Image: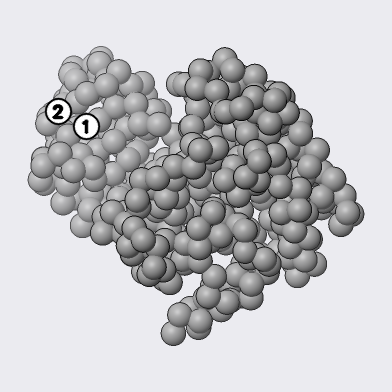
Amino acid sequence: MSLEIRKNIMSSVRRLVVKLGSNVLVTERGSLDQKLIARLAASIANLRARGITTTVVTSGAIAAGTDALGLTARPDDLPRLQACAAVGQAHLMLAYDQAFAAHGCHAAQLLITRDDFEHRDRYLNIRNTLNALAELGAVPILNENDSVAVEEIRYGENDCIAALVANNLQADLLVLLTSVEGLYRDAARHDLVDVVEKLDERILRLADGTRSALGSGGMDTKLLAAQMVTAAGLPAVIASGRRENVLDDLLDGQPVGTLFLPVKSKMNARQRWIAFTARSRGRLTIDDGAAKALRERGKSLLASGITAISGNFKAGDVITIADAAGRDLARGLTNYDAPDLALIRGRRSSDFKKILGEKFYDEVVHRDNLVLRS
C-alpha cells in the first residue's frame, strides 16, 4: 500500500522544492562537500529532463564562511555570524554554479528575509522571479540573507523558508534533506516512520529536539515545515541528503525517507499567505455562537461575536481568531483597526455608523479572507 501511495504522489510531481541543511552540505572537516553538491546537481538535471523543475533552499553560508576564514568553531555573536555568512555565501554559490554548469544550466541566487514574504507584493514578486527562472532553465538557490537580517526579520532556519517557498509556488512536493533517513519512532533511531497520514501532536512529539553543530534547525523545525505544507494540501518528505540518488529514487516512488500526506482540500495562494506566511498582528476572542458560524457554516466574522481584542493592528493586517476556550480557530484579514474594533466589539453592524461616524464593512473578517485551522 505504501509503494502504491508513493508512486501515485510522485507520478504527478512537476514542481519540486528541496531544502538542504548545513549538516548535509558540510563535511566533518567543516568544508563544503563539493562531491555531494555535484551529485545533487546531477539529480536535479535528470529530473529536469523528466519535466520536473526544482527550486533549492539551502543553508551552509555560515559554515562555509567559518571554514574560509579559518575559524575553529561557529561564532555565537550576531556580527561575526553575519560576517561569516557574507564570506561563505560567495563560496556556496560558486560551488552550486560550478556543479550546475556541468549540466548546462545556471544557479540563480536569491537572498531573502522574513519581510520579503510578509509583504504581499514582495511575496508575489518572489513567485514571479522563480517562475521566470524556471522558464529560462536556471535553478533558483534561495537562502536567508543572514549577512544583513536582524532578529526581528529573520526566520532563523531554512526549513520554514522552504515550506513558505513551496506554498508560494504551489509546488507538488517539498523535500527536506537532512543527515538522518527520516522520522523515527524512537530516540535510538531504529524504527523509521514510512508514511504519516496526519501530522498531529502525536507525530510532533517524535522530534528528539537535537540540533547539529553547524545548523540552526532540527527535526522539530522539519516537522513544523511539513505541517505547514501538508495543511495547505501538499505532500512533504524528510529524507537523508547523504543517500546516493535520493531525489531520483524518491521521485521514482521508492520507499525513501518519511512521506507526509496532505489534507484532501488544497488552499489557494491567497489562503496560504494568510494562514502561514504573514505574521499575526493581533488576536480576537469570539463566543461559541460565532465560532460555530465560522467552523460549521462558513460564515464571515461579525463584531457581535467578538468578546476580547489584543494587539495594535491596522485594517488589512492578519489577525488570529480564538474560540472561547483560547484555542486558535482561524486567521484572517481584518477590515477594522484595533481602536475602532474596540468600540464596535459585541455590537451589531447597524450600530457602526452611529459609533464610528460611518460604516465601512458589515464584517470584521470576510469569509473570503479567512482561513480555518484544520
Q: Nearer the viewer, residue 116 or 358?
A: 116
Q: For the residue carrying disc 2, how many other residues have a C-alpha within 10 Å: few (<14), some (14-19), or many (20+)? A: some
Q: Dot 2 lies on which element?
A: strand
Q: Nearer the viewer, residue 107 or 75?
A: 75
What percent of the width, then of the height, locates residue 171? 58, 56
Q: For the residue carrying disc 1, how many other residues have a C-alpha within 10 Å: few (<14), some (14-19), or many (20+)? A: many
What percent of the width, then of the height, locates residue 312? 30, 18
Based on the displayed image, in which of its 4 quarters is residue 58 positioned? Answer: top right
Kindly identify which residue carries mark 1.
284
Q: Nearer the viewer, residue 176 or 302?
A: 176
For the rendered model, the colour scheme is: one colour
Q: Residue at x 17, y 34 (%)?
A: 285
Q: Quadrant of the N terminus?
A: bottom left
Whether residue 182 sits left or right of residue 295 in the image: it is right
What percent of the width, then of the height, locates residue 354? 18, 18
Q: Nearer the viewer, residue 194 or 274?
A: 194
Q: Dot 1 lies on which element?
A: strand
In the displayed structure, would residue 266 be above or below residue 56?
Answer: below
Kindly identify which residue carries mark 2.
308
Which mark is on residue 330? none
CA gap between label 2 and label 1 equals 6 Å
Based on the displayed image, in which of its 4 quarters is residue 201 positioned? Answer: bottom left
- Whether residue 296 is visible: yes
Q: What is the three-letter code of the residue carrying label 1? A: Leu
Q: Residue at x 75, y 70 (%)?
A: 50
Do the residues under discs 2 and 1 have CB atoms within 8 angstroms?
Answer: yes
| Upstream in sequence: badge 2 or badge 1 | 1
Q: What is the three-letter code of the residue carrying label 2? A: Ala
In the displayed structure, would residue 154 be above or below residue 357?
Answer: below
